[in-house]
Image: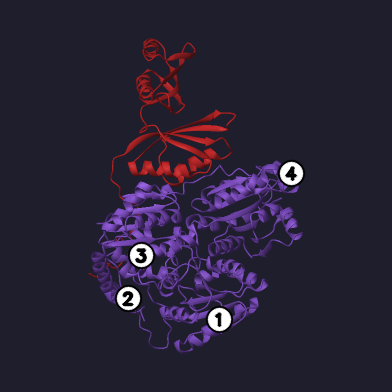
Amino acid sequence: MAALKIKKGSTSHSAYNLRPNFSDEIETHTLAVLVDNEPGVLARVIGLFAGRGYNIESLTVAEVDHTGHLSRITVVTTGTPQVIEQIKAQLGRIVPVHDVHDLTVEGAAVERELALFKVAGTGDKRVEALRLADIFRANAVDSTLESFVFELTGTPGKIDAFADLMRPLGLIEVARTGVAALSRGAE
Amino acid sequence: MVVQALKDQGVDTVFGYPGGAVLPIYDEIFQQNDIRHILVRHEQGAVHAAEGYARSTGKVGVALVTSGPGATNAVTGLTDALLDSIPILVLTGQVPTFMIGSDAFQEADTVGITRPCTKHNWLAKDTDTLAETLHQAFHVAQSGRPGPVLVDIPKDVQFANGTYTAPAKSDTTIYEPQTKGDITAINELVEAMEKAERPVFYTGGGVINSGPKASKLLRELVEATGIPITSTLMGLGAYPASGENWLGMLGMHGLYEANMAMHDCDLMINIGARFDDRITGLISAFSPNSIKAHIDIDPSSINKVIKADIPIVGDVESVLTDILKVWKARGRTVNRDAIANWQSQISDWRKVECLKYVQEGKVIKPQYALSRLEALTKEHDRYITTEVGQHQMWAAQYLGFEDPNRWMTSGGLGTMGYGTPASIGVQVAHPDSLVINVAGEASWLMNMQEMGTAVQFRLPVKQFILNNERLGMVRQWQELLHGERYSHSWSEALPDFVKLAEAFGAKGIICSDPDDLDEAIIEMINYDGPVIFDCLVEKHENCFPMIPSGKPHNEMLLGEASTQGVIQAGGAVMV
């Protein structure tokens, strides 16, 4: 066995970087997490993501079963397959978490997001905004002589596309709910 | 209510420190005799003592502290217990419910602060559900992968009368981890064991947490198959150090033969360990040619760091039972010839004698001190705790552990100041046993106030301090990795430990001559009461073997000789 040579004062051997180098591709997954609706449960889930350095692309949460005290948290996250598996396992460890479903791998799923867009402008731009809203089947839920608020439901991709189109037409503000998702079929 | 719940859970000891927000519970404690309360000197000490109690008994350790600073002082102990999977319950007082959120005196968001450092925690807002919450807390602490839990109890909830719920009537379905391993995977593992030419068991704290039966099954499996076994720092004692298949501890300061076996094996059977970075070294070069089986009760441990080829989620005791059953049913085969070759290869590695040291001259080598401590105490009914640093690694290398639950050390968090309070917790649980805290002087000073606890409760703990007047491990890293710039790693103005012992009402012993060491250790053992043993050792000794972080297992530093290039120019500071 060769003796290891350590250069004096060298930092390259300090090796403080202990992160495993899994070089797999980054994937985006939608997770549905069924939890007890109790104080602090959302903080536990979010704290896990923050504390372990996982990404949250979008997050929605609401009570879904009042009598059963159950809430559903839908998280869209990104990471290598190893990290995604780890996120699911870590979520499963939280005591008030009942179930973790990875809708991205468990068959087809429906994903929808609701967004509100405030678009201000006059003349041609205003007419064009209204025409595009019609194509996207967005509803005008508020209007003044200089502005509209459009309501649009769809996949995150559709919402992104609409936002891109509205931007040159006077888009001022966007509010998005984040993704809600369910698996398709009877199960 | 709280005291009743503790009694019904079989608690006999609580470590705690009173304060305004827990006075109603202290009043209850005053009016009963079933639960013994050990008054510590600092809340961190209470939690570490509860950990020591838990690790040495397998029961849930209980600590009771007040709100605000009491709770924040408990955070280090909770984190320590989380990383080492130790079942403890910490009860904290809280300001009354109607004052929560008002920045009241000694108010802290305890549940918020401790959320990431507990397995689970609760704010008990209602006296009627308090008992059930406490029973659930015990259930969560000790089932599945054990861990620390905390129940925060506002003062008005402590005062109010409510309906008590017995343990049997409490809903524990809130947490039901899987304990039985998948039988297909177990079959696959047994098949791999039958064929393997260079198999090795790599075991961890999970075996000890699973209970004494798990250690028994492990021994049976190792003896029957003849497969060599190594263990993490946390797992020492599950397989006896005197066992013929024992390789010694592995990892950063593990034995040469253990690390080489891990690197060269073709089948690695991980039982209740978690591929910690102190174990794996460089991940991409970690045991490159082996099939890796991983048995763990926590699914999140599997594939976290190292990809498992045969993952088995389950309790060690249950899985080992099934492995033995399947292996016996299939005809008890292993690849005997290949394993004999493997064993002879291991014998060659053993000849390197990686723990060899030379004791000469008038200065005590720390390795010598621990070898003598081992020789003079191994026949005793002995429990060892440690602080964190070089002395901890030397203790792991030079002391032999024959049984589980005999070795209490802060592994995952590496908490300096753990050992003294932990030794108190162990001694409370085992009043007639010899309890020794192997310490360095710097670590020891971090929770030295607990000597007061030891003296008050007549706990004859032995504080065996290897005093090198340095933060030895920090100094070692600075020498090897930071160009010998010893930034703030020596201790000036150290106390006179003998006088300090006397000031506490304990006995102090100082020893600096190797020729006097045996006699001094015997004096320490025989003294009926707490002792501070100031063992003055070689100041610049490095802890070897060592795998520098970021290096693979087969690139170990073996000792001064192999690091000559590093050390030569620093001859001035080397003795």
For mark 4, what is the residue?
Answer: B162
Chain identifier, purple in the render: B
For chain A, give the colour: red
- Identify the amino acid type marked 3: Ala
Of the residues tagged 3 and 1, which is closer to the observer?
3
Q: Are marks 2 and 1 in contact (CB under 8 Å)?
A: no
Q: Using the rendered image, report if marks 4 and 3 lie on a common chain.
A: yes
Of the residues tagged 2 and 4, which is closer to the observer?
4
Name the N-terminal-most of marks 2 and 3: 3
For mark 2, what is the residue?
Answer: B570
C-alpha gap between disc 2 and disc 4 = 69 Å
C-alpha gap between disc 3 and disc 1 = 38 Å
Of the residues tagged 4 and 3, which is closer to the observer?
3
Any part of residue B276 in sight: no
Q: Using the rendered image, report if marks 2 and 4 lie on a common chain.
A: yes
Q: Which mark is residue B525?
A: 1
- Identify the amino acid type marked 2: Gly
C-alpha gap between disc 2 and disc 1 = 39 Å
Of the residues tagged 2 and 3, which is closer to the observer?
3
- Identify the amino acid type marked 4: Gly
Instruction: Examine the rendered structure and indicate whether residue B436 appears above or below residue B188.
Output: below
For mark 3, what is the residue?
Answer: B224
- Badge 4 local density, few (<14 within 10 Å), some, or many (20+)? some
Left or right? Give the position of A168 relative to B415.
left
Q: Are marks 4 and 3 in contact (CB under 8 Å)?
A: no
